[in-house]
Amino acid sequence: MRALTVRPGQRGSLRVEDVPDPRPAEGEILAEGLALGICGTDREIVAAGYGEAPPGDDLLILGHESLGRVRTAPAGSGFQPGDLIAGVVRRPDPVPCPACAHGEFDMCRNDRYTERGIRKLHGYGSELWTVEPEYAIKIDPELADLGVLLEPASVLAKAWDHIERIGSRAWFGPNRVLVTGAGPIGLLGALMSRQRGLEVHVLDVVTSGPKPELVRALGATYHSTSVKEVVAEAEPDIIIEATGVASVVFDAMENNAPAGIVCLTGVSPVNRHLRVDAGTLNRYIVLDNDVIFGTVNANVRHHELAAHALAEADPGWLEGLISRRVPLEKAPEALEPREDDVKVVVGLSEEVLTA
């Protein structure tokens, strides 16, 4: 079969090449790969900034944003041939830590977890792949190839799960949300905020292209000014930060509401320095009972919540998130960002490219 591969730590090693077909272990699902979403983590691995091959191998099959169709499934697994599925990315560490032992492996405490297509496990970027039933998520067939959005949606499902848990520490009745960044994570964050009946504001630097219209189509308000200006106008109770831009991160932390919640989903580049009045920042966080927390990855429960959110969304709006579909043989082109990109998808099957 063909697969999208990289040799972690080696720049310029991205290839589409033939690799042996997977052999499902006892109890595993064998799936036909349909589509693969591309994100910044994939680009970082290709740039040799991250990623680990499975033990004893120098090759990593890339890809963690998956969509496949079941070919074979074990009896009693709850899956049948023809089902659309996505695979959970992370696996608990082998010790396990207390969080992993309770199924919360996205909150691993000892850093010994593994991740499909990222860390010590082959990914889903191949024409065939296998997955354990307990890490497979059934996709509503009406979504078709839009099911490839499940993994990024799971990150926001987790974010909202934790926002609501934090809010329950006291009286919690949010009305307005500010999302900084209108990439896939920010837009899916805006979607889930609107699904909760909240007034949503989205801030991004671009003023043209698909992003402003995608925001407006949700019934949300698009801004291209600054965090401080939007906060003064909208007075959000919750900020979901999805840019990873250090200056925007600190603007969100400095301008949130009293007893507000700031959820950080963007990963910032390292070795970028800002002058910050840390004393004033600490003062307001303490005196206002603010909460600032980070979130990444998701567990099985969050993937299931994300599957529900996608099934409830307007498929026409979800379709607008996919700006390019690239065939597997041209997959390296998908790793090269373009100005108007939102979400780029590699088609592992011809039917995805003709959808």
Image (tube, helix red, strand yellow):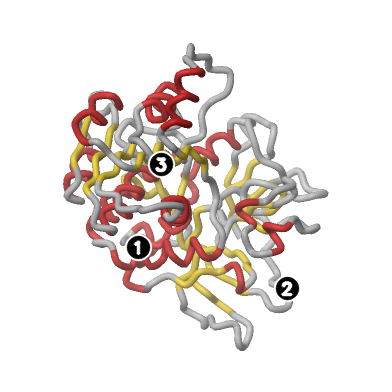
Amino acid under disc 2 = Ala
Lower position in the chain sequence, tag 3 or tag 2: 2
Q: Secondary structure at mark 2?
A: loop
Which mark is nearer the camera, 3 or 2? 3
Please determine whether, in this image, residue 80 is positioned above or below residue 7.
below
Residue 8 position, x and y percent, is 68, 38
What residue did someone put label 2 on?
25
Q: Position of residue 175 (x, y in %)?
A: 25, 49
Looking at the picture, tell me which residue is in the foreground, 37 or 302. 302
The one of 298 and 149 positioned closer to us in this rendering: 298
Image quadrant of residue 24?
bottom right
Query: What residue is shown with label 1?
Result: 310
The residue positioned farthest toward the front in the image shown: 287
Q: Nearer the viewer, mark 1 or mark 2?
A: 1
> Split into 4 quadrants, where in the image is the C terminus?
bottom left
Query: Which residue sits at x=35%, y=53%?
Result: 172
- In front: label 3 or label 1: 3
How far apart marks 3 and 2 lie (CA) works out to: 44 Å
N-term-proximal mark, 3 vs 1: 3
In whole angstroms, how far apart are the C-alphas of marks 1 and 2?
31 Å
Q: Given contact means CB atoms under 8 Å apart, are the residues at marks 1 and 2 in contact?
A: no
